[in-house]
Amino acid sequence: MDLKIFVFLSWSIFSFFLLDVAHGDMSYSLPEEMKRGSVIGNIAKDLGLQTGALTTRRARVDTEKKDKRYCNINLKNGELVVAERIDREELCGEKASCILKQELVLENPLELHRISLHVQDINDNSPEFNEELINLEISESADRGARFVIEEAHDADVGQNSVQQYSLEKNENFILAAKGNTVELVLDKELDREKQKEIHLLLTALDGGSPQRSGTVVIHVTVLDANDNAPVFSQAVYKASLPENSPLDTVVVTVSATDADDGVNGDVTYDFGHVTDEVIKTFNIDSKSGEIRVTNFVDYEASVTYEIRVKAKDGLGLSSYAKVIISITDVNDNAPIVSLKSLTNPIPEDTPAGTEVGIINVQDRDSEYNGQVHGSVQQNVPFKLVPSIKNYYSLVTTGNLDRELVSDYNITITATDEGSPPLSSSETVQLFIADINDNPPVFKEQSYSAYINENNKPGSTLCSVSAQDPDWRQNVCASELFYINENNALT
Ligand SMILES: *[C@@H]1O[C@H](CO)[C@@H](O)[C@H](O)[C@H]1NC(C)=O
């Protein structure tokens, strides 16, 4: 299909691009934080469907696994509209690209289209420093050119909307050296404790968004008359892996830093640097030993890696930083979920073998083998599951049905994953067989005989006959009586 371009006018700076419609995949680009009901694109047009077909084919948006549904289809005009608040920072954190996967399901015939929503960042967060005040203690003997690391500012936005530059309020002694993630104060003119014991500096971080946002921190420098060295971490990056649902208090990794100074100047304590709330809820660091322990259950399905900035500080407040990367590994801890997406119930008893009577979806929140699911139904019913697209199955009849023999079936659909040990779950549906008039009425007797006396009174009963029909209700024939009417004719 052709590449089509849609421009959504009320967001003059953002354009929506329908990126690709090949292989049933549709891709839309939209800014975060749009109002509910805002139009993302037109599904009917992009699929080349008449809008009426959306209703008849029961078009709907499904989500992958347990994700929220972020968009809906307006069946009247085919528009794809925003259904939930889309906050890029909450959904994708620091990831450079943020893609929400949704699925469009059509029935008759069953068709699945993947909808990828590329969520674009808007500049809705300001740069922030981890602390409001940074204390630095610097010896008056420090040489010109000496460098002092300042913890960088963070901005929840990404790309140009994240921190781009720093500026330091003009002062006599320090200049700023900022490169990438490293922000340093550089001593430009030597300190003299006898002249000035304390210096206050204002440092501003600026993002590159439009409009631009900024954040500030005060650096409080105390001028000392002692020599000092900053602590040094044994590694710049520590890597560790942790199985999900690990017992609380498990030590994940231990960081360590040494300081060349003696006494209080060489006493190193550890802490987290700038970390997300998620990290604070999940891990802690022992300030003395540098052990990082897990304090909350980690869920691979919620978070695959954690990145933690750790800080080592000596007695005089000189700090250095290292990075800890914790990878969470998957455990088969989620049973599959079976959901009945549609069902024709009841089905007529003359339904031919091979007819699709229902659509079933199976899902599993785990990854890889732990999340690979296959569905089945029990042996002794004339139904089977036929794999359809992706996680969908069709429930299909396999034989002739006869309501007069079996009027309903309890069909148990079981989904099992390929984890070890595997987990499974099942769902039972009671499917009724509807009657059709496929049986002729049958008289109880092959023939009836009756004797009539002459001079009978009109209305007197001659004899009664009865017939039965195994079909249901409307198909059952009532007994009839035979009477003599006034004209002496047999009715
Ligand atoms: C199916 O289950 C229902 C409710 O549990 C029960 O009333 C019915 O008799 C069952 N039908 C068959 C065919 O087993």
Image (cartoon, helix red, strand yellow):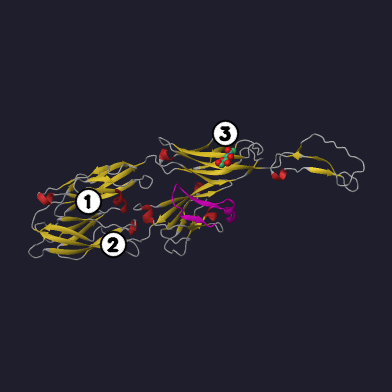
Give the vertical position of 427 relative to 185 (above or below). Answer: above
Residue at x 26%, y 50% (from the top left corner): 309
Disc 2 target residue: 206
> In what element is the residue under mark 1?
strand
Q: Which residues are magenta?
A: 47-74
Which residue of the protein is positioned furthest toward the right in this rendering? 455
**Which numbered disc covers residue 380?**
3
Task: Tell which tag, 3 or 1, sits nearer the viewer.
Answer: 3
Residue at x 80%, y 34% (from the top left corner): 446
> In what element is the residue under mark 2?
strand
**Which numbered disc covers residue 271?**
1
How far from the left and from the top, in percent, is residue 383? 58, 37
**Which numbered disc covers residue 397?**
none
- Is 59 in the magenta? yes
Q: Quadrant of ligand 1?
A: top right
Mark-to-mark CA distance, 3 and 2: 69 Å
Q: Nearer the viewer, residue 243 or 438?
A: 438
Which amino acid type is shown beneath numbered disc 3? Asn
